């Protein structure tokens, strides 16, 4: 790369209000952090900036009420682009990520804005939606140049290094995963400075991938594109502690003491989990630490340690119907899985230790009977807890 390159990361917005997206919209997504950190470790002359449009809505800078209101949106985007330290040129890569299909119309609107008003910029789309359903963005005169399937760091590096140009139709590129996370540069969250004040919590990832094969999860799809890569990859425990420290100190600067980790399955390797928790010494700086994991990874000792260190757990239970657990491919033995869940919940009750459970209703194959089975178990747990 012998010329100055600009990278603009854009988090799409949602006009509608969906109850099941409330948690996600209240979370500051950090996907731009990892991409920016990696690219800046490779290139000296690189300008990166972030437009986090959900927060621009809060600021009153994005006020449209319909995805058809392209004229007003263009005016508002023009003003936002004027706040950047660079202009959109042929050496500018505009990177968008869609976490779910709720962002589809937003991604489409943002991309079409750049296609019309800044056609020289190269538009790149990635994230969960791009990985699971890349064909959704193949249509006549699609504004997107490249669709990244999988992880983005090494793909973006190649795109910039080789000076990829605009395309007449979207081109799919499969991202090669980072095999050893410790090779990643140290965490630098400064790209979030403009928006962090809107949030009361902050989350990062310490691992990628998942060794399980749940039918509803995109991690299985991600793994299918790179079968030679380990299904669960993490920082070493010591490096994970260092990443955690950096996040906690950054959060403290903004008065934030609630943090979390948004790994697909936190601590999938129990030996790693135990070593990481043994090294954790941030109780004084954090009021709560949220993680999402599987209860069948844990044992009583680990649960006790997690409680002492202010960790709160979110379990992916998904269903209490043996038939649905088989359909979801949640566990090879649904009976033992549910028995384990009962024991784990009993342990939480004994410790008076708060826990959250994720349950899916309406998964393909769901019936009135299977819904009733799940409801019966959840009702029993609630009654025993009161």
Image (spheres, rainbow, N blue to C red):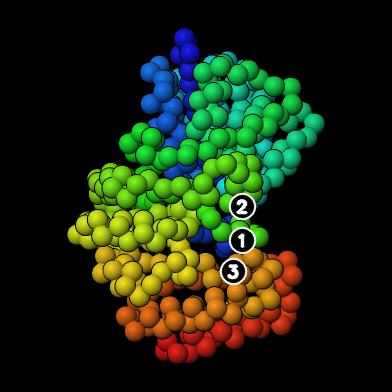
Q: Could you tell me if residue 194 is visible in this image? A: no
Q: Earlier in the sequence, mark 1 or mark 3?
A: 1
**Front position in the image: 4 or 317:** 317
**Front position in the image: 146 or 101:** 146
**Front position in the image: 328 or 145:** 328
The spot of residue 112 in percent (x, y) is 67, 31
The spot of residue 203 in percent (x, y) is 39, 51
Compared with residue 377, is residue 298 higher up or lower down, i.e. above or below? above
Q: Which residue is mark 3?
A: 331
The spot of residue 56 in percent (x, y) is 48, 41
Q: Earlier in the sequence, mark 3 or mark 2?
A: 2
Q: Which residue is mark 2?
A: 220
SS class, disc 2: helix
**Pointers 2 and 1 in contact (C-beta within 8 Å):** yes
**Mark 2 to mark 1 CA distance (whole Å):** 7 Å
The residue lying at 51 percent from left, 18 percent from top is 161
């Amino acid at each position: 790369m012998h010329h100055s390159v600009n990278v603009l990361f854009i988090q799409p917005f949602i006009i509608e209000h969906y109850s099941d997206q409330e948690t996600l919209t209240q979370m500051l997504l950090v996907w731009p952090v990892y991409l920016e950190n990696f690219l800046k470790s490779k290139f000296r002359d690189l300008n990166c900036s972030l437009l986090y449009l959900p927060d621009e809505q809060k600021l009153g800078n994005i006020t449209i009420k319909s995805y058809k209101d392209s004229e007003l949106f263009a005016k508002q985007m023009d003003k936002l682009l004027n706040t950047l330290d660079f202009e959109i040129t042929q050496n500018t890569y505009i990177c968008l990520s869609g976490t779910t299909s709720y962002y589809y119309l937003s991604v489409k609107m943002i991309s079409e804005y750049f296609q019309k008003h800044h056609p020289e910029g190269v538009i790149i789309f990635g994230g969960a939606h791009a990985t699971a359903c890349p064909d959704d963005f193949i249509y006549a005169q699609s504004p997107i140049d490249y669709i990244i399937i999988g992880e983005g760091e090494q793909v973006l590096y190649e795109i910039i290094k080789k000076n990829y140009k605009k395309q007449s139709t979207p081109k799919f590129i499969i991202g090669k995963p980072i095999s050893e996370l410790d090779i990643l540069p140290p965490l630098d969250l400064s790209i979030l400075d403009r928006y962090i004040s809107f949030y009361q919590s902050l989350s990062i990832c310490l691992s990628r991938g998942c060794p399980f094969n749940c039918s509803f999860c995109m991690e299985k799809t991600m793994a299918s594109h790179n079968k030679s890569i380990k299904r669960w990859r993490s920082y070493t425990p010591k490096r994970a502690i260092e990443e955690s420290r950096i996040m906690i100190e950054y959060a403290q600067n903004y008065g934030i003491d609630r943090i979390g980790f948004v790994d697909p399955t936190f601590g999938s390797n129990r030996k790693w989990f135990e070593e990481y928790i043994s090294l954790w010494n941030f109780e004084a700086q954090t009021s709560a630490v949220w993680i999402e994991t599987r209860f069948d990874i844990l044992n009583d000792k680990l649960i006790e340690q997690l409680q002492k260190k202010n960790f709160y757990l979110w379990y992916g239970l998904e269903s209490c119907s043996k038939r649905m657990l088989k359909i979801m491919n949640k566990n090879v033995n649904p009976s033992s899985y549910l028995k384990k869940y009962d024991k784990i919940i009993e342990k939480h009750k004994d410790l008076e230790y708060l826990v959250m459970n994720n349950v899916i209703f309406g998964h393909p194959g769901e019936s009135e009977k299977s819904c009733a089975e799940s409801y019966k178990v959840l009702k029993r747990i609630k009654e025993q807890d009161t």
